[in-house]
Amino acid sequence: MIQYFSIILMLIGIFGLLIDRNILKLIVSLNVFEIGLNLFIVSIGFVNNGIAPILTANNSSSNLNFVDPLPQALVLTSIVIGLGITSLGLAFARKIYKEYNTFDLNEMGGNN
Amino acid sequence: MKKVLAFILVAILGYFMITGLMTAQEFSTYGNVNLDEKISRNFIDKDVNGKSDEIIYGQTSNPETGSANYVTSIIANYRIFDTLGEVTVLFVSALGVSLLFGKNTKKYNFYESNFILKTASKMIFGLILVVGIYIFVHGHLTPGGGFPGGAMIASSILLMYLADNEFKANINKFKQAESLSGSLILVIGLLGIVTSGYFFYNFLPTGTVGETFSAGIIPIIYTLIGLKVGSELSGVIYNFMLEGGEQ
């Protein structure tokens, strides 16, 4: 079920990317898209009644019912890259605001 | 009109994704994943080289990677090329931010903070810093690791910037720490080539699963990644705090 919700979250992000003309809202849409994608990837590795993939003194054997650790590792990569993209996007947005005094792509004009 | 077109496009995309998810034969339904069919079973048994014994916390000594946290063993050992690329992407984005704001010199001033806020934030600053360091030093035993620990260090710097207008982090020291730890990560990878012929080979003894000094190069690499990410994100925050001073 959570897989369908995460797909809907991704679609909301794509919809926002398509219709918005405000740079900050575009960055927020990109983040919503990314969160949906990360939720989807994590949900691929879920196992019923699984436990977190860490050996502890209580869960001390590798034969226990762990959830899949590989999607979690890949999502950690994706989260960090999303952070980098967001910071760079916000830096560009601030630069653009300094240049045009607006965040709206329609009001900027330019030679189109 | 544009909204309707966008909605139709998104609806078509969603229809294909959801029906594809429902009808795919190779794709397990939610929660019914069989790990024995997947590569993750080898990661959990720590036997990608073919020695499959049960791993027991506190008893098994010298497995492939001694990390008790499987996610860490994947990030910092089995798939470390991914992590190297990830660190590079983060470095490039931090570089881009500092290129865009590099000419700014004046620091943005928030409202004047009072005495209680300044003192309390200084007390909390040390605690957040220590928790961040704990998280990346124990990345091979507990949840967390280099990236969350580094983010916590950067958040403590952000707290000081927000609470105290006179606060100045020594940004040059951060840059030195960042480049030093980034180079040391590559040096450890090259040491793997020298000792055993593979880039980033886990050449140290991996010890007993669950002990603090175990897992070979994983804690060293995660500590370096934590320092690198922490100083990089602190640099990004510092750059966002700057304004004016440019033409």
Image: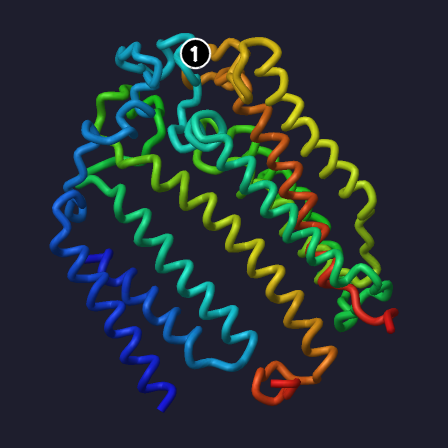
Q: Chain of mark 1?
A: B
Q: Where is residue A62? Give x, y as percent.
A: 27, 21
Quick one: which residue is furthest to the bottom in this view? B1
| Residue B175 located left or right of residue B65 | right
The foreground one among A31 and B128 is A31
Q: Position of residue A48 (x, y in %)?
A: 17, 41
Give the quarter of the image for residue B222: top right
Q: Say whether residue B244 is visible.
A: yes
Q: Is A20 left or right of B21, judged from the image as shown?
A: right
Would you name the residue on which mark 1 appears?
B208
Looking at the image, which residue is at 50% across and 73% down? A26
Give the color scheme: rainbow, by chain, secondary structure or one colour.
rainbow
The residue positioned 35% from the left and 14% from the top of the image is B49
Quadrant the N terminus of chain B occupies: bottom left
Within the image, what quadrant is residue B126 found in? top right
Frontmost residue, B199 versus B160: B199
Height in image: B157 above or below B142? below
Q: Quadrant of residue B191?
A: top right
Q: Residue B92: where, in percent of width, then height?
A: 65, 49
In the picture provided, is B184 more to the left or to the right than B192?
A: right
Q: Is residue A46 above or below residue B37?
A: below
Q: Residue type at mark 1?
A: Thr
Q: Secondary structure at mark 1?
A: loop
Camera-side residue of A51 and B40: B40
Can see residue B124? no
Name, please, the residue furthest toward the front: A112
Image: B59 above or below B168:
above
Q: Quadrant of the C terminus of chain B?
A: bottom right
Q: Residues within 10 Å of mark 1 (few under 14, many from 20)?
A: many
